[in-house]
């Protein structure tokens, strides 16, 4: 049994929040650089250059790359032989968010109630998913998820007869409707299967994986590639100003589902795909 | 083509009529910030017949909720937010003299029609480039609704703030036109 103190978690979470917002991952920067080479639109190329320059400024000046510093979403893998002392894990993560956002001059983007809408003033509560795993480590994955792309995301309960064609059609329609609103070039996270809530979680979870990495299942990898091609043929382009780079990547996660069901969730991420990872 | 340099607020309507969908522009002068909560409050004030805290005549509103400024900074990151959330309130503000809108993303048909009717213009800035765009902002002052925090109305002095004309006073829509040029399938 390993003992891990509350304070260690707080500090690690705080630094993850700041790094996510200041340092765009190399996976996304490489995807921008590659897209500059293949983009057909001159305006589109200009947008991509501006995004690279913006990422450089953010990293050098230690300022957020985007003013929407997001909802802090965590996927935490807690080893069952890791014992946390000094307080509970949820509180530690929220305290880390509070510290990270305040000390990092990040924006507070959470309201306490969806209808009354008073800002909580510290960007908490965060969204926390905890998975129990073997071992004695605590793995923390953090994603600063912007509101614009989240608003254009969608879930639909398709049925088995809709099949793969129905799934593709729903994905394409969601991306088309999002257009410039979701800040393309996008990362498109897709959940297929599970039940209503699992499906949404699968889509979100897929966005934590590095941009450019294909699914380990060859059939799903092929479907990801096919969707990348179809989405980039839509013409939406960087920022919706026309072009051939509408998405940087498509990620799919699947799960078993009911005999009557074929749920599909599309969780859009803007180009600021801010995911960071740490192990304690 | 070199970007057009424009002074804001607009001095006269003729300037706006010369702007066309797809024009790249650099705005210098004063703009006001307002997003969801400030729009809701302005609309409520107008409905009650009250005077707004800012005179909208010939002005430009930038849809942004900046991050807090670090010590030594004028403003934190300050890129555009999604404009469609302001669609519900925009025709009312245009009717009250507002001439320019800066944000990102599609506008509703009602807004596009109101832009034509009121001889106004909608610009898009590059979403997600808030660190870069902040460099065009030279001063910032909270003017109204301070309790709204990041959503308060701020007066910004900008120099050569880069954006692009999306919806012009003739009813053209650059998103539609530019995307059609690169569409390459039947989806």
Image: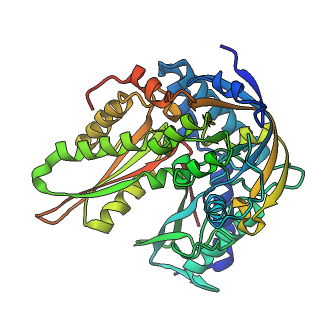
**Residue at position x 28%, y 66% from top?**
A196
Q: Residue furthest top?
A: B1
Residue B116 vs residue A219: left or right?
Answer: right
Q: Is residue A106 visible?
A: yes
Q: How is the image coloured?
A: rainbow
**Where is residue A250 drawn, in percent x and y?**
38, 42
Residue A15 vs residue B179: left or right?
Answer: right
Q: Quadrant of the C terminus of chain A?
A: bottom right
**Residue at position x 88%, y 55% from top?**
B71
**Where is residue A257 drawn, in percent x and y?**
19, 63
Of the pair A5 and B48, the residue shown nearer to us = B48
Q: Residue furthest bottom?
A: A86
**Where is residue A199 drawn, in percent x and y?**
30, 61
Q: Residue furthest front?
A: B49
Residue A97 vs residue B139: left or right?
Answer: left
**Where is residue A103 drawn, in percent x and y?**
77, 64
**Residue at position x 31%, y 36% from top?**
A227
The tally of labels here is: 0
**Residue at position x 44%, y 41% from top?**
B109
- From this view, report whether residue A253 is shown above or below residue A33: below
- From this view, report whether residue A85 is shown above or below residue B147: below
């Amino acid at each position: 049994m390993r003992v891990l103190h509350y304070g260690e978690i707080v500090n690690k979470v705080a630094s993850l929040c700041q790094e996510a917002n200041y340092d765009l991952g190399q996976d996304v920067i490489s995807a921008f650089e590659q897209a500059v080479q293949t983009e057909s639109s001159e305006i589109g190329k200009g947008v991509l250059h501006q995004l690279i320059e913006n990422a450089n400024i953010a990293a050098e000046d230690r300022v957020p790359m985007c003013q929407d510093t997001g909802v802090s979403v965590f996927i935490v893998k807690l080893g069952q032989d890791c014992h946390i002392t000094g307080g509970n894990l949820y509180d530690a993560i929220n305290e880390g968010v509070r510290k990270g956002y305040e000390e990092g001059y990040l924006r507070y983007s959470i309201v306490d109630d969806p209808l009354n809408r008073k800002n909580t003033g510290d960007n908490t509560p965060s969204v926390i998913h905890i998975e129990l795993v073997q071992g004695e480590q605590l793995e923390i994955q953090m994603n600063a998820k912007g509101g614009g792309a989240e608003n254009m995301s969608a879930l639909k309960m398709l049925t088995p007869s809709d099949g793969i064609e129905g799934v593709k059609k729903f994905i394409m329609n969601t991306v088309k409707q999002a257009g410039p609103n979701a800040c393309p070039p996008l990362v498109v996270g897709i959940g297929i299967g599970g039940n209503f809530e699992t499906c949404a979680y699968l889509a979100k979870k897929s966005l934590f994986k590095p941009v450019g990495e294909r699914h380990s299942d060859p059939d799903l990898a092929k479907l990801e590639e096919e969707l990348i091609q179809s989405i980039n043929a839509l013409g939406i382009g960087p920022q919706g100003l026309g072009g051939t780079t509408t998405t940087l990547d498509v990620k799919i996660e699947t799960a078993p589902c009911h005999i009557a069901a074929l749920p599909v969730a599309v969780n859009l991420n803007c180009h600021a795909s801010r995911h960071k990872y740490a192990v304690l | 083509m070199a970007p057009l340099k424009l002074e804001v607020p607009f001095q006269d309507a003729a300037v706006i009529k010369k702007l066309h969908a797809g024009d790249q522009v650099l705005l210098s002068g004063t703009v006001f910030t307002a997003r969801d909560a400030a729009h809701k409050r302005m609309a409520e004030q107008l409905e009650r017949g009250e005077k707004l805290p800012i005179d909208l005549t010939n002005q430009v509103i930038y849809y942004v909720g900046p991050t807090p400024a670090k010590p030594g900074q004028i403003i934190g990151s300050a890129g555009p937010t999604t404009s469609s959330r302001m669609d519900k309130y925009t025709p009312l503000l245009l009717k009250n003299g507002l001439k320019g809108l800066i944000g990102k993303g599609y506008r509703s048909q009602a807004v596009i029609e109101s832009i034509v009717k009121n001889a106004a213009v909608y610009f898009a800035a590059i979403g997600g480039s808030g660190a870069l765009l902040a460099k065009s902002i030279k001063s910032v002052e909270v003017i109204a609704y301070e309790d709204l925090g990041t959503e308060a109305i701020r007066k910004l002095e900008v120099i050569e703030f880069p954006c692009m004309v999306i919806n012009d006073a003739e009813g053209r829509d650059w998103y539609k036109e530019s995307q059609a040029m690169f569409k390459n399938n039947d989806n």
